[in-house]
Amino acid sequence: RGEGLGNKFLGNIRMTDAIVHVVRCFDDENVIHVEGSTDPIRDMDTIDLELVMADLEMVERRIDKAKKAAKGDKKFLQEAADFEGLRDWLNDGKSARTYEEVNIAEEYPDCELLSLKPVIYAANLDEDGFADPHGVEYYRQVEERAQAQGGQVIPVCAKLEAEIAELDAEEKKMFLDDLGIAESGLDRLVKASYSLLGLISYLTSGEDECRAWTIKRGTKAPQAAGKIHSDFERGFIRAQVIAYKDLEDADFNYAAVKAKGLQRTEGKEYVVNDGDVIEFLFNV
């Protein structure tokens, strides 16, 4: 039925590469829950069922299309059979990502099923629960469900995150130290999301700004340069690379890093690493 935002909700998810599912894991009579109580498994099931129902409609259309195509080309019979198996699986209320009979994502990359998208569960806890997530029954329930699906759970506290967002870097560190927490839930969520999607960032730095560029892990230097501008990739000559750790150890003194011979010159086959600080040379 499209709970919440209706069909807009499903449309928004269709545009994503992965899903971060925020699940309430705290009791507070001052914070209303639409169902009147806290039950993370029920809430997860509600969303999962919405995605499965949307996928069932798509799979039914795919089966009909394959059967019609099979009248002219028998190879489509296998496609129809594969999706009939998936349809039966979805009809049991189970997601496409847990279907193992056929690797749908690999065999049919054009099939964009909602319940096939990878998921990270963000367990939203209160302040006490965030300090000790495994002491919270709600969190343990979410963790058990995620493990059964091969997913991840990241503990977060939305209330704390809102407070942290108002602080500068030094105040944020002091705040987290007082709580006995190494990093915020949002920082952990960002890292987990990057890892799930196979993403890294490299940096460019000049007098005016330092900027991060997001690329797929395994991207070579010319293609990484193309993220800035297509001319950079087309006219790529070489990349001048400094590892972020080397720059940090030198207190971000570029001259000192270069004097130590820690700036490298890399060519077209160089695979960019997470945190590389790069200057691209190009000619068009």
Image (cartoon, helix red, strand yellow):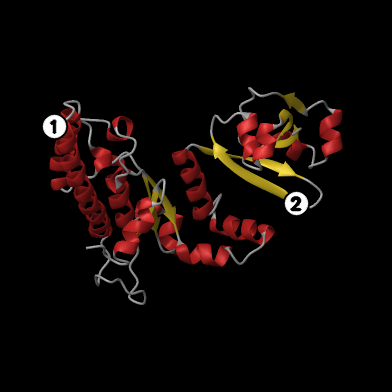
For the residues labelled 2 and 1, the Cα–Cα distance comes to 60 Å
Relative to residue 7, is residue 214 depicted above or below?
above
Please identify the quadrant where the C terminus is shown: top right
Q: Nearer the viewer, mark 2 or mark 1?
A: 1
Q: Residues within 10 Å of mark 1 (few under 14, many from 20)?
A: few
Q: Amino acid at mark 1?
A: Lys
Q: Which residue is the site of mark 1?
A: 71
Q: Nearer the viewer, residue 6 or 130?
A: 6
Residue 157, horizontal then vertical, whole percent:
45, 61
Q: Nearer the viewer, residue 141 or 177?
A: 141
Name, please, the residue furthest toward the front: 72
Q: Which residue is the site of mark 2?
A: 209
Instruction: Name the image quarter holding residue 253.
Output: top right
Q: Amino acid at mark 2?
A: Glu
Q: Which mark is residue 82?
A: none
Residue 44, horizontal then vertical, whole percent:
27, 55
Q: Is residue 65 left or right of residue 256?
A: left
